[in-house]
Amino acid sequence: MIKRIEKQVGDRTLTIETGRIAKQAGGSVMVTYGDTMVLVTATAANDANPDVDFLPLTVEYQERFYAVGRIPGSFFRREIGRPTEKETLTCRFIDRPLRPLFPAGYRHETQVIAQVMSMDQENDPDILAISAASAALSISNIPFHGPVAGVRVGYVDGTYVLNPTHTQLRDSRLNLIVAGSRNAVVMVEGGADSLSEGEILDGIFFGHQGLQPILDMQEEMVADSGKEKMAFTVPEIDDSLRVKVAEIAAEGIAEAITIADKMERGNKVNGTKKKVLAALEDSGESAKVISGLFKDELKKAMRKKIVEENTRLDGRAMDQVRPISCEVGLLPRAHGSALFTRGETQAIVTATLGSGDDEQRVESLYGMGFRNFMLHYNFPPYCVGEVRFMRGPSRRDIGHGALATRAVQQVLPDSDSFPYTLRVVSEVTESNGSSSMATVCGASLSLMDAGVPIKNPVSGVAMGLIQEGDKTIVLTDILGDEDHLGDMDFKVTGSARGITALQMDIKIEGVTRDIMGRALEQAKVGRLHILEEMKQAISDPRKELSEYAPKILTIKINPDKIRDLIGPGGKVIRSLSAEFGVKIDVDDDGVVKVFAPDGAVARAAEEQIKAITEEPEIGKIYNGKVVRIMEFGAFVQIMPGTDGLVHISELEHRRVEKVTDVLNEGDEVQVKVLDVDQRGKIRLSRKACL
């Protein structure tokens, strides 16, 4: 039976429908907003996977070009198998609010697939996919403690906007995705134009209020069309085994959580774990189950140390940032480079300047676009003392890179005043908590080292949360273990002026306004402290670009002169490029960019371009060449492709009987521009120069 529910969300109607399409999936819904439509299915295997000790959930998001009536531009004319960056990021947006809401011990392979079926290029399908995924799971036979919903929040002319259109986002100071349950926020991700903590907090809970009608729709659909949830069995573990693990591990864990050094602490933990496994080898239980019990004991001990003893693993105060070291100019041939170290987290970050040809071509449902700023994050296995295959960027790598991109992009100069393509690369060389925030700090340092005139340096800090009973503790600059064993990972970036990006993931069912407000204010203190430490290395962008960076000069010419600069078949521009060893880009609006290895060459090429494209100036004297003789006067070329008429009366102060008595073809002559009419005809005088 087809079930269709409509409600007003923002200033448009949202529709959720089920029972018509993909009926063999565990649950399926079609969500429509404007002319954007997303089909989401949720399906689970009938039997649990006995080989996993984690939630086997996979989320896929696919954009199809038929959704906007286009054929893909790739060689194969079909969507390439590897997801685009947008698809990867949207998968993460969908996954993160869903994952904490599955019951503990659920081990059935579960897959959520979101497919964009139609798109109007104003209503982005990514936020629809979040709500649709929750709806599909909620009405399916899959156990799920939802619903949740997602919305986007903009901030236009001082007013919050729910689900702003693509056009509205161009003028918005905020682009924030908020996912939430009935009583709490479960996921936040977005960028901001230096907004205050209060403005960000208001925006988050404006979004949380705005998503309530979507939760109502899902609950109504579950009541009408929901399937009976499948039964699943969580293997029972003998309490006596749990006690034995705790007894054997107690001494080793107690010692481990007093060790500040990550690698030493890890070695002690691994040694204690091996001891437990060896002691219980004949218990009749699998090593996987015993390892899980050991992890539970370790988690309890670490959380107890923080909550009851008010002491962190490395001995810091709850709001204290680890020691910071910053260096710039580390790599002599990179245009800009920085080494940022915070505790046991470290990143080498480089900045490279390029020309317009280096822009990244991006094909999306919005059409073909070009990206002149790229930030790439790499997390090699050695940075955490591991050995594994390196197979290109993971979803996590792409997500961390996107967060750092949003953080830094807000402070970059506009392309008119700084017409370079920029690429920042972060090589994480050590990691113990929030390498993405180290990337943000290193990116600011490397850009300033390269001489990029950023508006303000940006730093970032990761906040954590431990909730036990009625105690809630917010942690600044969390370690890896505090992330893994804690309840929240809340990353906040910004300059001294305000917040530029944020990302929040949780492992509990939600975070209240009070907790989030505390975390934002505590993050501000940490962020400003890190900025002060960064200033010790470099406080402002260098006045000059690196000697190894290309030099760019921008010249504005009359668009009518573009053909003169390019020449027949590109002859003129190719000749200039070869003569000076430069690259010349010409835009349709007459903006000419000269990319040269050094400033002297760029200026020489600039003079020649100006000579070719210069427009005659009334009253100016030119050295010209006679190109044609007529009875009434001589045509003189005063610049390449431009000539004017010297009337016979303007040849001499005396009367001239024949033009050839004074001038002949090929003669060099000095002339003055008397007038340029509306049709572009130029009147010259020789006698005005005598």
Image (spheres, rainbow, N blue to C red):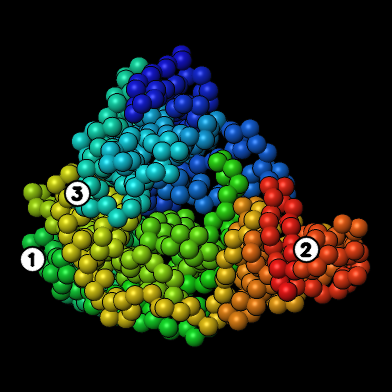
Characterize the local packing of mark 1: few (<14), some (14-19) or many (20 or more) Cα atoms within 10 angstroms.
few
Ranked by sequence position, the earlier of labels 2 and 1 is 1
Residue 438: % across, % down: 34, 69
Ranked by sequence position, the earlier of labels 3 and 1 is 3
- Residue shown at the point (42%, 62%) measured from the top left: 412
Q: Secondary structure at mark 1?
A: loop
Residue indicated by mark 2 = 650
Please identify the quadrant where the C terminus is shown.
Answer: bottom right
User: In 3D space, how far apart are the residues under numbered discs 3 and 2 (Cα atoms)?
Assistant: 74 Å
User: In 3D space, how far apart are the residues under numbered discs 2 and 1 (Cα atoms)?
Assistant: 99 Å
Pick out the residue farthest to the top.
1
Residue indicated by mark 3 = 198
Task: Check the image and report above or below for 259 versus 459.
Answer: below
Ranked by sequence position, the earlier of labels 3 and 2 is 3
Q: Secondary structure at mark 2?
A: helix
Characterize the local packing of mark 2: few (<14), some (14-19) or many (20 or more) Cα atoms within 10 angstroms.
many
- Residue shown at the point (8%, 66%) measured from the top left: 309
Q: Secondary structure at mark 3?
A: helix
> Viewer-proximal residue, 191 or 538?
538
Which three-letter amino acid code belongs to the residue tagged 3? Answer: Gly
Residue 20: % across, % down: 51, 19
* Marking on residue 309: 1
Q: Nearer the viewer, mark 3 or mark 2?
A: 2
Which three-letter amino acid code belongs to the residue tagged 2? Answer: Glu
Characterize the local packing of mark 3: few (<14), some (14-19) or many (20 or more) Cα atoms within 10 angstroms.
few
Q: Are the residues at dot 2 and dot 1 in contact (C-beta closer than 8 Å)?
A: no
Task: Check the image and report above or below for 665 versus 68.
Answer: below
Residue 200 visible in the shown view: yes
Task: Check the image and report above or below for 592 versus 208.
Answer: below
- Residue shown at the point (38%, 36%) measured from the top left: 164
* Marking on residue 384: none
Residue 295 visible in the shown view: no
